[in-house]
Image: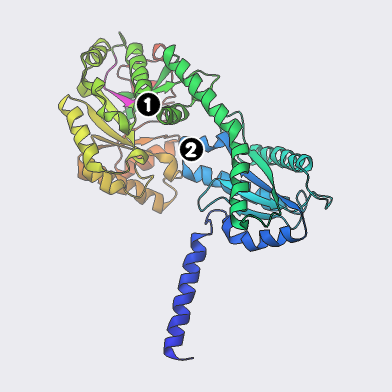
Amino acid sequence: MKTDERLDARRLRREYLRFRAALRDPNTDLYTYTVYFDRVRALLQDRPAIGVLWVGLGDRRLIESVYGWEAFDKLVLSAASFLRETIGPRLDKESLLCTAGVHADAFVLFVPCDRAGRELTSLSLASVATDLRDAMEAHLSREVRVETNLSAGARIGAVRLLDNPFYRFERRVYSAIDQARAMAERPQESERLAWVGELHRVLRKSQVSCVFQPIVEIESGKSVGVEAYARGPESSVFRLPRVMFSLGREAGFLGDLDRLCRKTILGALRGSAMEGWLFLNTHADTLVDPEWCSRETLAMIGAAGLSPDRVVLEIPEGQLSGDLETLRQAMERLRRMGYRISLDDVGSGGRSSQIVDALRPDFVKFDLTLVRGLGRDALRTEIVASLVRLAERSGARLIAERVESHEEVEALLACGASIGQGYYFARETAVDAMNLGAHSRREIWP
């Protein structure tokens, strides 16, 4: 083969691999349905119709906002594995499984006939979809156990794709998939609207409570402050604050929800004579809220026995996407009022150093579960040591969250970390059940 021919062959292969990668989901290793048009056309050659199923994960999508994208990817992969295994035992062996798109959280199935090999009628296709939904929900409930209070899981819509040569084949496939998706998501949309209504009631009736967890000097056990956690109604999906705030942002209630939580927490602290800093979780989008500087908010802070320089606004690193300069300016306005800034979950993303250098927070917090086993693994120890150096370089104080063992305490001290928070020291509790003043080592440590 000539040199030019070899170069052309390599170029074509690179383009082919690039094209194939654009159509293959790296998490599930499934291709998008557009790859299978020829095979779908072949299924229709000897049949008047085949079934098109859209398989979605329903309200389990909220898992990503509560536990992060890695946990949700695990759920999607588990669903894909289950669906692969259904072809043969539950679905006809010629059925085709595809992803709805690269990095999508839904699947498309092309099913040529029922399990007995008979033509799919509307009734028999509905039966196939119902059986598949129930089996898939049972699988996901066993395999992926997460605490979310979510009521509904797998959603499946099913339509028949008819053999009608009068219309262009590809458009008929797209139309069938759109119809199946609409059928699957119709009840999901209804539930979402019900949740929005429930969240509106939470706001209208101020159905938010709060608990507090001490933040301590690791060496002395002295409390240097507390972190406040807002909670929705106990029996509701909004018991988990990340779910409550995720839907609140989507529904346009984020500012109202943030103000309600702030009011509830400061009201609970009135007359408590707490010492140290109060860490308030907030969303990055609410830093521009003028209410932070209003007379009403400053009066609530004063009634709680605090001043703005003892209030720390805590923002997760994962929310900081986009223009850091605009965010820095919003933080500087708050700092001029006296507020302090804390970045939470530092180290969970790939831009930690850039973000900390740009925003110069007063506190940097990292979740010790990211490096669980600290003290037994040199790599994990080096990760913590690098976070200590990052905090020192930016002039911030480093706080280790979710500390659970004496071994971790000793390893943190060896790495240079001096402030911690977690069940090893104290659990979250209501304000009236906890001494919010300075603690002795004996009172904090077990």
Check disc 2: other Cα within 10 Å, few if <14, some if 14-19, many if 20+. Answer: some
Q: Which residues are magenta?
A: 274-280
**In x, y percent, where is residue 183?**
63, 37
Question: Which residue in the rendered view is the most extreme toward the front?
Answer: 166
> Picture quarter containing residue 151?
top right
Instruction: Determine whether 212 is above or below 366 in the image.
Output: above
In the displayed orientation, state which residue is furthest to the left. 336
Q: Place residue 411 in its image quadrant.
A: top left
* Residue drawn at x 53%, y 47% as measured from the top left: 73
Helix or strand or loop: what does disc 1 sit on?
helix
Q: Which residue is mark 1?
A: 254
In the image: residue 40, left or right of residue 400: right
**Amino acid under disc 2:** Tyr
Q: Between tags 2 and 1, which lies in front?
A: 1
Q: Decide which of 222, 346 is in the foreground and name it.
A: 346
Q: Amino acid at mark 1?
A: Leu
What's the distance in space between the residues labelled 2 and 1, CA to CA?
Answer: 19 Å
Q: Is residue 431 above or below residue 176?
A: above
Residue 276 colored magenta? yes
Query: Along the line of sight, which residue is nearer the eye, 137 or 147?
Result: 137
The tag earlier along the polypeptide, 2 or 1, is 2
* Residue 82 position within the rendered picture, expressed as x and y whole percent measured from the top left: 67, 48
| Residue 247 visible within the image | yes
- Residue at the far bottom in the pictured view: 2
Q: Is residue 90 left or right of residue 78?
A: right
Q: Is residue 56 visible?
A: no
Label 2 sits on residue = 67
Say which mark, if any, is on residue 114: none
